[in-house]
Image: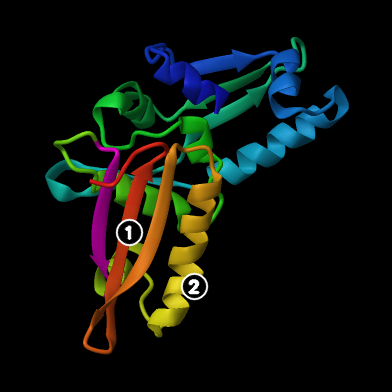
């Protein structure tokens, strides 16, 4: 998260970022003896969470958050090499629909939390203040988006295990948004979900 913050700050030309043990112990709030194990644990988790980026002609690209991480015992520093495709994405982040603090976004741990946040922010209206908007998504769209196949066949289970958990985590994170979700019906059958997204302090319009 520190490395990506540097990339967002405009240092996107560099693809590698070195941090001293002092900087990392302060950021991670750990002692020097626990630092190496903690950095290793975090890196393993990050490398196991690939990101899907938009590709050419409506295609997609699956890539890792980090290209590599190195520890130099001589200096004690840790060198993070970023995925080049993501550096370009982050340097242009303010112009994209993903308008949220990067460190809080990366801390989302739920299986579907990041992708639901991306879905909601992509649905943000192009005009207006962006303080409040609603997005309606069908159950079929949710199933296709998350490749659920036959998992959570009942709408009640899908809402509980896919939607509600992610929305709860998004609301607890320091992302600047408050999300509410309600079920939409077609007759007595669940049609999908309506998300109501409000920027903290924003008013419905």
Residue 107 falls in which quadrant of the image?
top right
| Residue that mark 1 sits on | 195
Which residue lies at the image location 36% right of the left edge and 68% below the top edge?
182
Element marked by disc 2: helix
Q: Considering only vertical position in the picture, is 144 above or below 3?
A: below
Asked if residue 152 can be seen in this view, the reply is no
Which residue lies at the image location 76% right of the left edge and 22% below the top edge?
25
- Any magenta on residue 18? no
Residue 23 falls in which quadrant of the image?
top right
Which residue lies at the image location 28% right of the left edge and 47% below the top edge?
204
Q: Nearer the viewer, residue 102 or 156?
A: 156
**Looking at the image, is mark 2 or mark 1 earlier in the sequence?**
2
In percent of width and height, residue 200 lies at 42, 38
Q: Residues within 10 Å of mark 2 (few under 14, many from 20)?
A: few
Which residue lies at the image location 87% right of the left edge and 27% below the top edge?
33
Q: Residues within 10 Å of mark 1 (few under 14, many from 20)?
A: some
Residues under numbered marks 2 and 1 in contact, where contact means CB atoms less than 8 Å apart: no
| Residue that mark 2 sits on | 160
Asked if residue 196 can be seen in this view, the reply is yes
Question: What residue span does the magenta drawing correspond to?
Answer: 130-139
In percent of width and height, residue 108 lies at 53, 46
Element marked by disc 1: strand
Residue 168 — which label? none
């Amino acid at each position: 998260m520190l490395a990506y913050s540097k990339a967002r700050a405009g240092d996107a030309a560099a693809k590698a970022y070195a941090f001293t043990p002092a900087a990392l112990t302060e950021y991670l709030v750990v002692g020097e003896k626990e630092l190496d194990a903690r950095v290793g644990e975090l890196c393993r988790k990050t490398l196991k969470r690939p990101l899907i980026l938009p590709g050419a002609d409506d295609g997609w690209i699956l890539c890792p958050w980090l290209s590599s991480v190195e520890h130099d015992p001589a200096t004690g520093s840790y060198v993070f090499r970023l995925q080049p495709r993501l550096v370009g994405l982050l340097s242009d982040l303010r112009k994209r629909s993903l308008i949220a603090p990067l460190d809080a976004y990366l801390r989302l741990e739920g299986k579907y939390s990041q992708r639901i946040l991306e879905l909601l922010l992509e649905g943000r209206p192009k005009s207006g203040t962006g303080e409040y908007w609603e997005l309606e998504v069908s159950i079929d769209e949710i199933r296709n988006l998350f490749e659920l196949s036959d998992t959570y066949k009942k709408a009640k289970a899908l809402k509980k295990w896919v939607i509600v958990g992610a929305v709860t985590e998004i609301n607890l994170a320091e992302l600047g948004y408050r999300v509410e979700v309600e079920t939409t019906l077609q007759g007595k059958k669940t049609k999908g979900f309506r998300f109501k997204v409000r920027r903290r302090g924003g008013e419905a319009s």
